[in-house]
Image: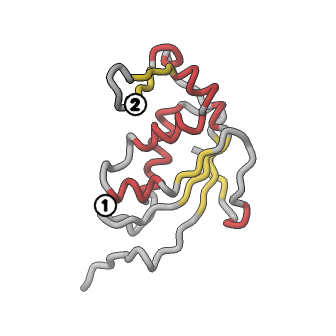
Amino acid sequence: MKTYVPKVNDQERKWYIVNAENQVLGRLATQIAGILAGKNNVAYIPNVDCGEFVIVLNAEKVHTTGRKLDQKIYYRYTGYPGGLKSRPLRKMLSDKPELVIWRAVRGMLRKNRLGAHQLKRLKVYAGEAHPHQAQKPETIAL
């Protein structure tokens, strides 16, 4: 008896749409990370890229619990002395809501080339419109 090992070229990847409206950020990000990694597939293998595509809509309407809107800070460093920039979650949601979900999901994926490949299949949009109608995505409720 031989064990079936899925190959990257043999897979047909599905497209899923997730509506982020009234969803809690962290719980939503864990579900999305699981789909990107392929943990919902029967033939899941940790070292093989067997995940699906995920389209996230309404990123600007995501919620958080507690006082994270003012207390959660996003940092970035410009590379220059004194170049540490910080922004609270409230400002990030108003300016770049796609980046909030993208960074939450990125933190839950692997920190290697496999995680980078999986993250490329995440498409995040602030509103309802998206340009992926030709892929015939399925809507799933998380």
Q: Position of residue 35 (x, y in %)?
A: 48, 54
* Viewer-closest of 68 and 42: 68
Q: Earlier in the sequence, mark 2 or mark 1?
A: 1
Up/down of 23 relative to 9, above or below: above
Q: Write the residue at 45% across / 42% down.
A: 105
Most foreground residue, 96 or 136: 96
Q: Is residue 64 above or below residue 38?
A: above
Where residue 20 sits: x, y (%)? 62, 38
Q: Is residue 24 visible?
A: yes
Q: Label 2: state its secondary structure.
A: loop
Q: Residue furthest left?
A: 1
What residue is shown at x 32% (from left), y 23% (from top)? 81
According to the image, label 1 marks what residue? 46
Q: Is residue 58 left or right of residue 117?
A: right
Amino acid, disc 2: Thr
Q: Residue furthest front?
A: 80
Cβ–Cβ under 8 Å for marks 2 and 1? no
Location of residue 75 by image quarter: top left
Relative height, residue 140 to residue 87 (above, below):
below
- Could you tell me residue 131's position as x and y percent? 71, 56
The residue most toward the bottom is: 1
Placement of the C terminus among the 4 image quadrants: top right
Helix, strand or loop at label 1? It is loop
Q: Quadrant of residue 48?
A: bottom left
Image quarter hosting the N terminus = bottom left
| Amino acid type assigned to the residue bearing label 1 in the image | Pro
Percent position (x, y) of residue 45?
32, 65
Tell me the number on the disc at residue 78.
Answer: 2
**Nearer mark to the viewer, of 2 and 1:** 2
Circle 1 residues within 10 Å: few <14, some 14–19, many ≥20: few
Disc 2 to disc 1, C-alpha distance: 34 Å
Instruction: Locate residue 40 relative to residue 3 in the image: left or right.
Output: right
